[in-house]
Image: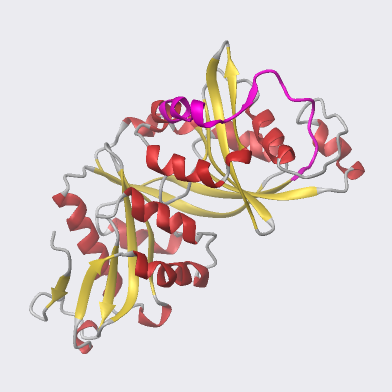
Amino acid sequence: MPCSHSLNHSKIPNHNQIRSFSSIKIVPFKKKHIQFGWNLTQEENWITTVDELQDLLKFDPKGNFILECDGTARAMIFSTKYKEFTFIGNFIVEKEFRHKGLGRLLFSYAMNSLRSRRVKTIMLDSVPEAVPFYSSFGFKEICRSLRFNGKLPTLINPKPKNMHQITPDILESIINFDEQIFGSSRKILLKEIYNRNPSTCFYQTQNGQISSYIMVERRDGYFKIGPWIVSQNEPHPEDLLLYCIAHDQKSFNTSKISNISNISNTSNTFTSYVNIKLGVLERNTRAVNLLQKMGFKISFYAIRMIFGQSYPIMKNFNGIFAQAGPDRG
C-alpha cells in the first residue's frame, strides 16, 4: 500500500457528489492530524482522548488514514492490528461531508489495506443505524456492545490480602495474563495506559497466581475503566473495582462495606461518590449481571460486528469485564 493515494476520477466510484471535488487523496494519519482527529471525536460526543489517539498511532502506524478533499482533511479511520485479528475504530466523516460517498471510499481503502497485510479477522463496534453499511462489506453481527455509567462510593474495606498495586516489575506478568484471555498481545497499549495511570492499576491473585487486573484512568468528572480482565477462578472481581476507585481518592469515607450488596443498603450514609464509565459486551453475562447489581445503567449500546474468520477471542468474552476501548477491544 503506497504512503499516499491520490484518487483520479477514473478510479472514483460513480457518485456525482464525490466527482464534484477537484482532488481526493487518502494519506497516512500522522501526528499532525491528532488535533483534527480529536476534534472529530468530540463532535460525536465520544470520550476519546488525545492520549488514546496517540497510543493507537504508536501501536499500528500503518493502519490509520486521513481522507482529504481538495487538500483539506475531511475524514479519518483507525485500525488496531494484533497478531491474530484487527479492530477498526474512530471512523468519522465530518458532518457536512457525509452522504457523499466519502466514507465508503475511505472504508474500502482501509479494508484493502488490511487485506494486503493478510488480516483475516476484523471486528468493530457500529452504531445501530450504520449496521447496513458494514453489512454491505460482509460484516456480521455478534452482539450488543454495552456502555455502562454508574456511581460508586469512595470507601473500601481494609485492603484484601490478595489485592496488589501493579508495579513495573509485575507489569510483564500482567501483559502475559492479558494475552491469555484477550487472545493476543497488547503490550504497547497496556504499557502506555499503565505509564499514565500507575496509581490506579491493580491486580488480584488466587493461590499465588494473577486472577484479574484493572486499569483505571481519572478524567474530568469521571473514571474510565478498562481494560478489566478477569479469570474464571476469581470469585470477587468487584473488590478490584471498588478498591482501585477508593484508593485514588485523596480522602474518603473509611466506613466498612462487607460486600457489594451492602452498597445499595447503606448508600444514603455516604456523601462522596465518583462517576464510572466502561464498556463490555452483552455476551459477558457475568460482568453485565455484576454491573447491574452494583447499580450501573446502560447509557448507550453499539453493535459488535465481525468480518472474516472467527477467532478464539470469540470464546473469551467472559474474561473481558471492561474493554480498553471499542477501537482496541
- Image coordinates of residue 309 in percent, x first then y, are 24, 39
- Say if 221 sits above or below 231 in the image: below
274 displayed left or right of 268: left
Magenta stretch in the rendered image = 152-176
Q: Residue at x 58, y 47 (%)?
A: 278
- Image coordinates of residue 22 in percent, x first then y, are 19, 88
Determine the residue located farthest toward the front in the rendered image: 169
Q: Residue at x 58, y 19 (%)?
A: 205
- Image coordinates of residue 146 in percent, x first then y, are 54, 48
Camera-side residue: 116 or 292? Answer: 116
Q: Residue at x 45, y 40 (%)?
A: 191
278 displayed left or right of 145: right
* Residue 256 visible in the displayed image: yes
160 in magenta: yes
- Say if 2 sits above or below 59 in the image: below
Camera-side residue: 323 or 220? Answer: 220
Q: Residue at x 90, y 44 (%)?
A: 268
Write down the quadrant of residue 28 in the picture: bottom left
Figure quadrant of the C terminus: top left
